[in-house]
Image (spheres, rainbow, N blue to C red):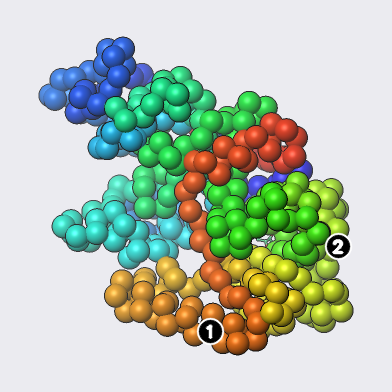
């Protein structure tokens, strides 16, 4: 059971024929009749937006958010049926990552600061494709397909009636999940995939008998990672609080260490060494976790808790990236000299990875439970 700590919410039905559009040239045949092509009418939709960074009181519901537009022929517009929230949404509401996201949205810095507002949060989405750009082959996606996606944090999010995404960020939703269930998964799944597969070099063919340690195994990323690794045949050890032991054991974990019971590093040092450590906790873990790896065997420490976005927020893009580069290079070299690899893991949008995950879900290899909160 996967207690993905996200909020899933259902959305209102759409009234497409009240929208307008410069999308006329990019929509396929019949789709054109769904859109009002008169430029004299505003293109609006309901959404939760923020107009400045701050606490919860900056959230504002509006029926007049800008309707998303297909700007590139490989994009699709999706009608959101359910959206999920992650800890990063709460951080972004307070301005976390604003400098880097601004650069991703506007690399040439043409717009003034603050041009990201009104900003729509929400990284997880499950919904139905309403419109495809001209380069989106019907073999991949067509109108009416049920899809899920993790929305990159530099794009407008899913707390809205519609969202525009690149087709390679979108994937067909698992058939066995409802939209609400599906909206709890993509961001943590894509993050786990990025950390374990892209950064950690693991895959379904090389995991058998590998010893993996997950620090912070009971959260969203941790519980998804456990199930992926167990499906691929790895031996998985996790740290979590005693309360969560039952949960992670139910997901198939081989060994559990309760971090509330005493110095966790002492208990972990008594175990056989690991091929990979995934760190979802951060803090002082770096000072001891790399010592748990098998030296000179290509073993890797991958941490998801990095100072990258905080550096750019604090120092600006140029100095922040320089500081980040120096920090990661120094740590990588320092640990390489001891025979282990030090890496930073980052969320990356990845439709093809979600395709594989969708298959695992439909095959019953990944299970879910979630609490659902409806927003009126
Ligand atoms: N770099 C990137 O792109 C991304 C980074 N992240 C980061 O990854 C981390 C995990 O994210 P996510 O799974 O969504 O977060 P969650 O809040 O869902 O889970 C965090 C878990 O950590 C556990 N925990 C807290 N302290 C400790 C500790 N000292 N030792 C062991 N476990 C501990 C808690 O478990 P318990 O209840 O058992 O105490 C909790 O379940 C976060 O730090 C997040 O910021 C996430 C996404 C993308």
The quarter holding residue 70 reads top left
- Image mark count: 2
**Mark 2 Cα-neighbour bin, 10 Å: few <14, some 14–19, many ≥20:** some
Q: Is residue 66 left or right of residue 300?
A: left
Mark drawn on residue 321: none
Q: Residue at horizontal 61%, vertical 40%?
A: 356
Inspect this view and state whether residue 36 appears.
Answer: yes
**Mark 1 Cα-neighbour bin, 10 Å: few <14, some 14–19, many ≥20:** some
Which residue occupies the foreground of this view, 6 or 267? 267
The local secondary structure at tag 1 comes to helix
Q: Quadrant of the N terminus?
A: top right
Mark drawn on residue 255: 2
Q: Residue furthest left?
A: 40
Look at mark 1 in the image and give the residue it sits on.
333
Which residue occupies the foreground of this view, 193 or 38? 193
Q: Residue at horizontal 79%, vertical 74%?
A: 273
| Vertical arrangement, residue 316 with respect to residue 61, above or below | below
User: Of the residues under marks 1 and 2, which one precedes in the sequence?
Assistant: 2
């Amino acid at each position: 059971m996967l207690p993905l700590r996200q909020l899933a919410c259902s959305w209102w039905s759409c009234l497409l024929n009240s929208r307008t559009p410069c999308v006329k040239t990019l929509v396929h045949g019949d789709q054109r009749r769904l859109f009002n092509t008169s430029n004299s009418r505003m293109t609006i939709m309901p959404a939760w937006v923020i107009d400045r960074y701050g606490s919860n009181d900056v959230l504002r519901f509006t029926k007049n958010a800008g309707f998303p537009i297909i700007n590139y022929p490989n994009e699709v517009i999706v009608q959101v049926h359910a959206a999920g929230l992650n800890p990063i949404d709460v951080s972004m509401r307070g301005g976390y990552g604003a400098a880097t996201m601004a650069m991703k949205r506007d690399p040439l810095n043409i717009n003034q600061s603050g041009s990201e507002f009104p900003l729509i949060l929400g990284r997880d989405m499950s919904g139905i494709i309403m419109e495809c750009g001209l380069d989106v082959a019907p073999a991949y996606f067509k109108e009416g397909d049920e899809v899920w996606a993790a929305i990159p944090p530099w794009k407008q999010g899913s707390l809205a009636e519609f969202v525009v995404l690149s087709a390679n960020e979108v994937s067909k939703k698992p058939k066995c999940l409802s939209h609400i269930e599906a909206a709890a998964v993509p961001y943590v799944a894509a993050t786990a995939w990025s950390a374990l597969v892209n950064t950690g070099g693991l895959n379904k063919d090389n995991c058998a008998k590998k010893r993996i340690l997950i620090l912070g195994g009971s959260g969203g990323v941790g519980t998804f990672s456990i199930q992926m690794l167990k499906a691929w045949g790895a031996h998985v050890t996790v740290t979590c609080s005693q309360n969560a032991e039952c949960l992670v054991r139910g997901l198939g974990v081989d060994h559990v260490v309760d971090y509330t019971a005493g110095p966790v590093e002492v208990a972990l040092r008594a175990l056989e060494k690991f091929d990979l450590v995934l760190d979802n906790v951060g803090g002082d873990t770096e000072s001891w976790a790399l010592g748990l790896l098998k030296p000179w065997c290509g073993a890797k420490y991958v941490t998801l808790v990095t100072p990258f976005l905080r550096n750019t927020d604090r120092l600006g893009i140029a100095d922040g990236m320089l500081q980040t580069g120096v920090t990661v290079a120094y740590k990588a070299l320092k640990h390489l000299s001891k025979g282990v690899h030090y890496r930073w893991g980052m969320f990356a949008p990845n439709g093809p990875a979600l395709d594989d995950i969708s298959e695992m879900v439909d095959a019953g290899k990944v299970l879910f439970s979630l609490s659902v909160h409806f927003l009126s």
